[in-house]
Amino acid sequence: MRIHPAFRWLTIAGASFLMPAPAGAGALELTAIGYDRRIDLTWHAPPDQPGLSYTVERAATPEDAPFQPLSSGPQDYPVYSDYIGENDQSYRYRVKAWDSAQALVATSPSVTARTVALSDAALLSSIQHATLRYFTDFAHPVSGLAREGLGHHRDIVTSGGSGFGVMAILVGVERGFLTRDQARTQILRMTRFLQDTCTRYHGMWAHWINGETGQTIPFSPKDNGGDIVESSYLMQGLLCARQFFDDATDPQETELRDRITQLWHDMEWTWYLSEPEGGALYWHWSPEFGWEMNHLIRGFNECMITYLLAIASPTHPIPADSYRSGWVHDPERYKSGKDFYGIRQFVGPPLGGPLFFTHYSYLGIDPKRINDPFCNYFENNRNITRIHRAYCIDNPNGFKGYGPGAWGLTASLNPDGYKAHAPTLDDGTIAPTAALSAMPYTPEESLEACRHMYDALGDRIWGPFGFYDAFNLQRAWVSDSYLAIDQGPIVIMIENHRTGMLWRLLEKDPQIAKLLDTFAAPDRGHSLWEVLP
C-alpha cells in the first residue's frame, strides 16, 4: 500500500493507524485509531473558526472507492466511533466541517485504520479512553466543566459530574491518553471558573451551572441555590487533583493547589446543619427559598461522601456525632441484615437500591477503609452488586436480555425519561455504568458483562463516548445520549479496580487520612461515635 507523505503509521497498544502529519494553521486534522471491532475518529477544528458542525464519511480501502456518509447529520463535537463489529477490517475516513449557514468550510485529508482484536486489558483501556472523551472533547468550551448530558442544552454544566470529570482526567494522564500539561490546563481552567465566576452559596455550588456565565440554572423550581451533595462530588475530585499536581516548582500547579485549598476552606458545611450542635445535613439551601426544599440527608444512599467531607473539613467541620444522628439517624431503618439470593446485605434498602449508591461516594474514598458498627462498606457494596446480578439472572419480571452478561440497575435514562432503577423499581432498563462501575467489587462478573455488552450489543449501544447511557431490549429502545454522572464512574472505578489510583490519591490528603484512620478498626463497635474527629 502506498502511503501519502502527509501521513505516518503509528502503533498504540497493538492498534495500527494512519495519522496526519502536522499541518498548517486552519487545517482540519483527523486521527483514526483501530480498536477491537471499532475505529475511533477524533479531529481538531481550525482554531479561528469556532461553532462548526461536522459530518463523517467512510470508504473502503481501495483508493478509488467512493466515500459514503456515516453520520445521520451534522454534529457539534469532534469525536466519532465507527462500531464495525468485526476485526481485521480496514477503512478510510474523512470529516467535513460546516459553518452555521451550512456552508462547507473544510474537508480533512483522508485517514485509514484497521480493527484489531484486543486483550481484555487493552479493551478496558480503550473503553476508559472513549468514555474520558466526554469530559475532554465534549467539555464546555468556556469553563471546561462537564456538560450535564449530550441531550441537554450545551450551556448546562453539572457540578457533581465535573468532579467526576476531574478524576477521569487524572486517570487519562496516568493511562497516557492525555499529557500532564493538557490535564493541568483544563482542570486549572475549571478551577478558576469555579472560584472566580460561579455563584456560590456559603461555599457550595449549585447542581446546574451556566458553563459560560457561572450563574445558577435551577434544577427544579425551588432548587436554585447550594447543593451540598453535588458540591461533595466536585470537591472529592478537586482534592484528588490537589494531590496529583504536586510539583512545587511549577507555578500553574501551585496555583491550582492553592485555589483548591481555598475552595475547600470556603465550604461552610455547618451552615447546612439542621441543628447547631449536630443532626442531619440539609441537601439544599437558596437565598430565595431558604430551606423550603426540606431535604434532610439520611443514609444509606449515595451521600456518605457528604458527611465524610463535612466531618473532615479543616475550617467548617460538623460534629462527628452527625454521622450517627444525621447519616444513620435510625439504626433499625439504616441497617438491613437480610439475605437476598443467599447473599447478606448489611445496610441499605431492600435488594440494595440503585447501584450508584455503591459508586458515587466511593470514587475517591476506598470503601475498604470504612468500618462502622454495621459493616465494612466494601463488603456491603460488593454484596449489593452480587444481589443485583443475581436478581437480573433470576429476572422475575421476564425482561428481555437480562442475564449474566446484562445486569445492573441504576439511575439512568429510560424509554420514558429518567428513573433511579433498582430491583424494586425495575422496568427492563440496563445502564452499562452499573456493571462497569462495579468492577472493584465484582471484577470477573463486571468484565463478563462488559464483554457481552461490547461484543454482542455494541452495534446498538456503542457511540462516540463509549457505551450509550442505557438500553431496554424489552421495548427495543437504546438511549442516544450520555450523562456526566454515569460516564465518570466508568473511567474512575475501572481504574480503582486496576490500580486503586483515585483511592490512593484521596487518602494522601491530610484531613481525609485522619478521618479514614478513625474508621479503620473493624472491631471498634459503637465506640466509633466517641472517637471520630
Image: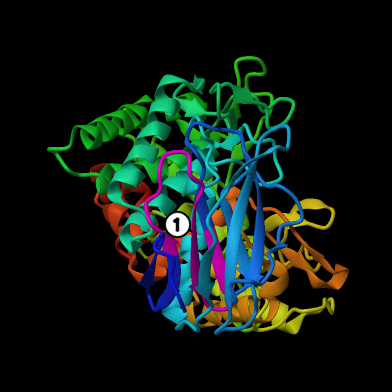
Q: Horizontal and vertical percent for residue 480?
A: 73, 56
Q: How is the image coloured?
A: rainbow
- Residue at point 45% right, 57% down? 362
Q: Horizontal and vertical percent for residue 53?
A: 65, 42
- Residue at point 85% right, 69% down? 476
In the picture, which quadrant includes the C terminus? top left
Examine the rendering and report whether any part of residue 376 can be seen. Answer: no
Examine the rendering and report whether any part of residue 232 can be seen. Answer: yes
**Horizontal relation, residue 145 to residue 423: left or right:** left
**Horizontal relation, residue 423 to residue 229: left or right:** right
**Horizontal relation, residue 515 to residue 488: left or right:** left
Asked whether residue 31 is drawn in magenta, I would say: yes
Q: Is residue 122 above or below residue 69?
A: below
Q: Which residues are magenta?
A: 19-41
Asked whether residue 515 is drawn in magenta, I would say: no
Q: Is residue 175 above or below residue 323?
A: below
**In the displayed image of the protein, which residue is found farthest to the top?**
288
Pick whichever, 327 or 367, lies toward us.
367
Task: Give the image quarter of residue 125.
Answer: bottom left
For the residue carrying disc 1, how many other residues have a C-alpha within 10 Å: few (<14), some (14-19), or many (20+)?
Answer: many
Pick whichever, 54 or 324, lies toward us.
54
Q: Horizontal and vertical percent for residue 23?
A: 40, 48
- Badge 1 marks a residue whose secondary structure is helix
- Residue at point 55% right, 21% down? 213
Q: Horizontal and vertical percent for residue 136?
A: 48, 47
Name the residue tied to disc 1: 362
- Residue at point 63% right, 49% down? 96
Residue type beneath disc 1: Tyr
